[in-house]
Image (tube, helix red, strand yellow):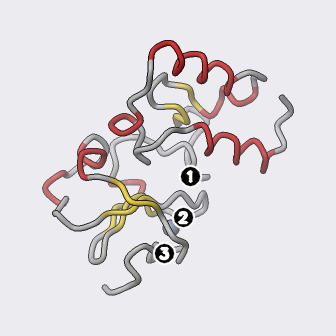
Amino acid sequence: MLFFADKCPSCNLAGHKVSSDTMIHHVKDISRISDAAYYFCSTPECDIVYYSQDDLFTTSMVNKEIGIKSSSSDQALLCYCYNYPKAELVSNSLLDKIKIRIDNFGNRCDLRHPAGRCCINDIKKIVAVQKVEF
Ligand SMILES: [Zn+2]
């Protein structure tokens, strides 16, 4: 396999870099993780979670559902620090709830979120697409 370093081999969109520390918490078989540069694909319709220059991890190769992937169930998490599932998006204050918790208790998205970064912007995008009324 050979493809542009930062583009997902499936959807061809650029992902963002993740550390191996992040991946160790989410990949089922950590022996597959090398010292290569890995990226996270956040395209909802794409089945790939992590990819590098010569390897990839699909949604079935990680140990939890990825809430921002459209194939995930309503119980899949959006916020992994405070365990808020997609199903909570029907309530009208999810973003506020998460922000209050982060303000008071901090966050460890680098280890707890498969994307290795905060869920707030992803949730805002989902809200914009679904036009959920807040
Ligand atoms: Zn992709």
Which is more N-terminal, label 1 or label 3? 3
Which is more N-terminal, label 3 or label 2? 3
Residue named by callout 1: 69
Residue beneath the point at 35% across and 67% down: 51
Residue beneath the point at 22% across and 67% down: 36
Q: Position of residue 7 (x, y in %)?
A: 46, 75
In the image, is residue 17 above or below residue 120? below
- State the SS at label 2: loop
How crowded is the residue under tag 1: few (<14 C-alpha within 10 Å), some, or many (20+)?
many
Q: Position of residue 74 (x, y in %)?
A: 61, 36
Residue named by callout 3: 10
CA gap between label 2 and label 3 equals 7 Å
The amino acid on which the numbered mark 3 sits, given as a three-letter code, is Ser
CA gap between label 3 and label 1 equals 14 Å
In the image, is residue 103 above or below residue 57? above
CA gap between label 1 and label 2 equals 7 Å
Using the image as rendered, state which of residue 132 and residue 28 is in the foreground: 132
Query: Which quarter of the image is occupied by the C terminus?
Result: top right
Mark 3 near ligand 1 (CB under 8 Å)? Answer: yes
Residue beneath the point at 54% across and 64% down: 46
Using the image as rendered, state which of residue 84 and residue 121 is in the foreground: 121
Q: Position of residue 94 (x, y in %)?
A: 68, 24
The amino acid on which the numbered mark 2 sits, given as a three-letter code, is Cys
Q: Position of residue 133 (x, y in %)?
A: 86, 33
> Are discs 1 and 2 less than 8 Å apart at CB?
yes
Query: Which quarter of the image is occupied by the N terminus?
Result: bottom left
In the image, is residue 39 above or below residue 80? below
- State the SS at label 1: loop
Residue named by callout 2: 46
- For residue 17, which quarter of the picture? bottom left
Mark 2 near ligand 1 (CB under 8 Å)? Answer: yes
